[in-house]
Amino acid sequence: MATSTFGVAPRALDPDAALRATYLLHDLLEQIPTMFGRLTRLADAIDPSGQRYRIEKLDTIMAPELATEIIQREHNRILVEWLECPTIFRVADMAAHFRRALRQNTGSLVSLGRRRAYERLLPLEVPDITRLHFLTEMRILVPMVAARLELSISAVL
């Protein structure tokens, strides 16, 4: 049996529903100007149980477990793509995300760094090496973003 990039056997999807869900998800994410913001949005879609993703518009056109699979694939794809970007891009991307979030009063770098809340940004299922890579990068990037935003480093750690 074939497996996906993340070691999970793909389930049979209704191709039309999967295509509609994929377009819907891409339309939703395209409204978010930063890659880090997209990671945050997808992490916010994780159900409090930690077992599945929940985006109502997708759940209405397909079974929730299939919607979860599509969202999880996209979450993993964006995470890997973001990690492959140069450090300077990731710092600028995060800074732009937090500038926007501060203007909208929806999030802060301080809470992200202090509570290591960035761990919650990971997809539900992610290879251990990707998890370690992301967590290591975040420990490095949070102070760099703080400096770019002219915040005290001690305020975010």
Image: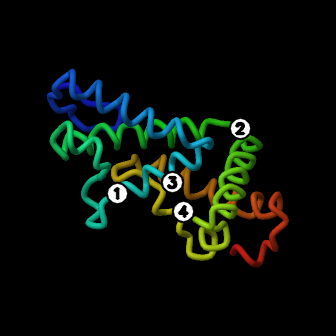
Q: Earlier in the sequence, mark 4 or mark 2?
A: 2
Mark 2 — residue? Answer: 86
- 72 or 134: nearer the eye? 72
Dot placed on the residue nearer the N-terminal end, 1 or 3: 3
Q: Nearer the viewer, mark 2 or mark 3?
A: 3
Residue, disc 4 = 118
What amino acid is labelled 1 in the image? Ile
Q: CA distance from mark 1 to mark 4?
A: 14 Å
Q: Give the residue at x 77% y 64%.
A: 146
Q: Residues within 10 Å of mark 4 (few under 14, many from 20)?
A: some
Spatial CA distance of label 4 from label 2 is: 19 Å
Secondary structure at badge 2 equals loop
Front one among 8 and 45: 45
Circle on res. 40: 3
**Cα–Cα span, label 2 and label 1:** 27 Å
Q: Amino acid at mark 4?
A: Tyr
Rounded to the nearest angstrom, the CA distance separating label 1 from label 3 is: 10 Å
- Do residues under tags 3 and 4 come within 8 Å of each other at their CB atoms? no
Vertical position of residue 61 compared to residue 50: above or below: above
Looking at the image, tell me whether mark 1 or mark 4 is earlier in sequence order: 1
